[in-house]
Image (tube, helix red, strand yellow):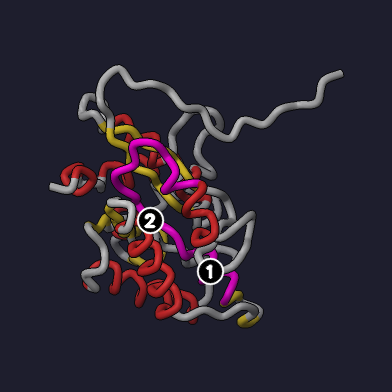
């Protein structure tokens, strides 16, 4: 009886020159809570929008991933070279990461691994610096709402808002995608619109992931 094999990467030869954008993140990038085996994560939907534009999307989201500490595997800083910068044809990164650092740092039971916005910003800056050394642009994405999630707290929400403000106004990134309002409840932007999250107040459903992909200005991906 043969032991099972795990496939971590499949490389294909494109029919025409193709640039690659790698989406670096956690379960929200991986596509948790979307329809299983239906390819409905926001990176999948973004890939559909990029058809015919000579761009491909590589999804480097891992459920439980964090920027600063190990969670479900190495943190984003530790896996950047292997999972992102080594991808052939990479030209850009979309970075959507930090909600697990915040949530696990400030649980309703009290801080366990507290983290502030400055530490998350420093991690983002390190990713930007390392990517720029390889000629790769980094696009920052705002963290989506999480009020009502199992690890949500007022202290964590304050960090999320501070980080999102910095992503949008700090000028560190080569471009910005404002995901947060694309799925937020207009009456309460701290939580999801019910159309886009019908389970855990953390992970979008299929419609939510579609809304996120629709929020991407394709010119930002291309660097125009």
**Relative to 155, 15 lies left or right:** left
Q: Which mark is residue 95?
A: 2
Q: Quadrant of residue 131?
A: bottom left
Q: Where does residue 164 sit, x and y in percent of width and height?
A: 33, 69
Task: Using the image as rendered, state which of residue 69 and residue 63 is in the foreground.
Answer: 69
**Which residue is at a point 33% across and 32% down the rendered structure image?**
56
Q: Nearer the viewer, residue 66 or 156?
A: 66
Residue at 52% over, 79% down: 115
Q: Residue 213's image quarter?
A: top left
Mark linked to residue 68: 1
Q: Which residues are magenta?
A: 83-105
How much space separates mark 1 and mark 2, taking CA atoms? 14 Å
Answer with mark 1 or mark 2, whichever residue precedes in sequence: 1
| Image coords of residue 176 (percent x, y) | 24, 58
* Total residue callouts: 2
Residue 219 belongs to magenta span = no
The answer to whether residue 119 is above or below residue 67 is: below
Report x, y in % for residue 146: 47, 63
Query: How far across and how far down the image is residue 60, in percent?
Result: 47, 45
């Amino acid at each position: 009886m043969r032991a099972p094999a795990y496939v971590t990467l499949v490389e294909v030869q494109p029919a025409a020159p193709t640039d690659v954008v790698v989406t670096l993140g956690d379960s929200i990038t991986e596509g948790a809570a979307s329809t299983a085996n239906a390819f409905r994560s926001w990176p999948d939907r973004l890939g559909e929008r990029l058809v015919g534009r000579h761009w491909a999307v590589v999804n480097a989201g891992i459920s439980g991933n964090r920027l600063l500490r190990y969670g479900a595997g190495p943190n984003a800083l530790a896996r950047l070279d292997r999972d992102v910068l080594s991808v052939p044809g990479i030209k850009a990164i979309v970075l959507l990461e930090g909600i697990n650092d915040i949530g696990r740092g400030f649980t309703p039971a009290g801080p366990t691994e507290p983290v502030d916005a400055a530490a998350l910003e420093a991690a983002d800056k390190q990713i930007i610096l390392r990517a720029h050394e390889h000629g790769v642009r980094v696009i920052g994405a705002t963290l989506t709402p999480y009020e009502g999630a199992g690890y949500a707290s007022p202290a964590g929400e304050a960090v999320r808002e501070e980080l999102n403000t910095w992503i949008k106004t700090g000028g560190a990134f080569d471009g910005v995608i404002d995901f947060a309002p694309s799925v937020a409840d207009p009456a309460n932007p701290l939580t999801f619109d019910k159309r886009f999250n019908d389970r855990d107040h953390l992970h979008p459903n299929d419609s939510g992931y579609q809304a996120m992909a629709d929020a991407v200005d394709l010119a930002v991906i291309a660097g125009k």
